[in-house]
Amino acid sequence: MLVLHDTMNLITNVSRRKTCRLRPTLLLSFAGCCLLLSACDSRRRGSTQNGTSWSNKPILFAEPNPVPAGNPDQPLATTQITWSTGGEAIGDLYVKVNRAPEVFLGRGPSGTLKIDWIQFDSRYEFRLYAKKRSKLLVKLEVTRED
């Protein structure tokens, strides 16, 4: 807490003066304090992956989405699905392609799957359930550009 106290004194003194010279130790203390506060804030919100904040809410995202068209001669493209139930609860990931029945893909409180079978002119709806499909937590539509 001494570093924080010194840093607050530095900020107060700087705001009272028009010009000041910062001592290297105080400058390092200020930088260290900023890094410490930033780390504490990110832990409170949850860690991040791909710029997405992990919190206590369920998440489901695809990267990329929409999936780029790429070469028209390549009928299949790839995306990566990432999910989290937002806690320790086990989630079940399913996909529904067009009007076909849902298909089970994976289970766990969180995870990432490489999906390498995205086709043109198809609609993919990924669904994350809790408690063996008793509750839909979140769903996500993935498409492929024309």
Image (spheres, rainbow, N blue to C red):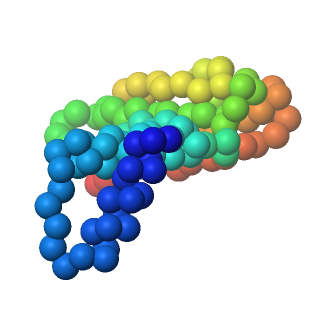
Residue 4 location in percent, x, y? 44, 47
Taking the spot 18% from the left edge, 50% from the top edge, the residue there is 23
The correct choice, above or below, for 46 with respect to 20 in the image is above
Name the side, left or right, on which 28 lies relative to 81.
left
Splitting the image into 4 quarters, where does residue 52 fall?
top left
Q: Is residue 57 visible?
A: yes
**Residue at image location 38% in from the left, 50% down from the top:** 6
When the figure is inspected, residue 73 is found, relative to residue 146, above or below; the finding is above
* Residue 127 in which image quadrant: top right
Point out residue 60 in the picture as x, y percentages from the top left corner.
56, 42
Q: Is residue 67 above or below residue 111?
A: below
The residue furthest right is 134
Q: Return the residue found at the far top.
A: 107
Q: Residue at x 34, y 63 (%)?
A: 11
**Is 84 displayed left or right of 119 in the figure?**
right
Kindly tell me whether residue 98 is visible in this rendering. no
The picture places residue 79, in percent across and down from the top left corner, at 37, 35
Residue 101: image location, x then y, percent: 68, 34
Q: Nearer the viewer, residue 55 or 6?
A: 6
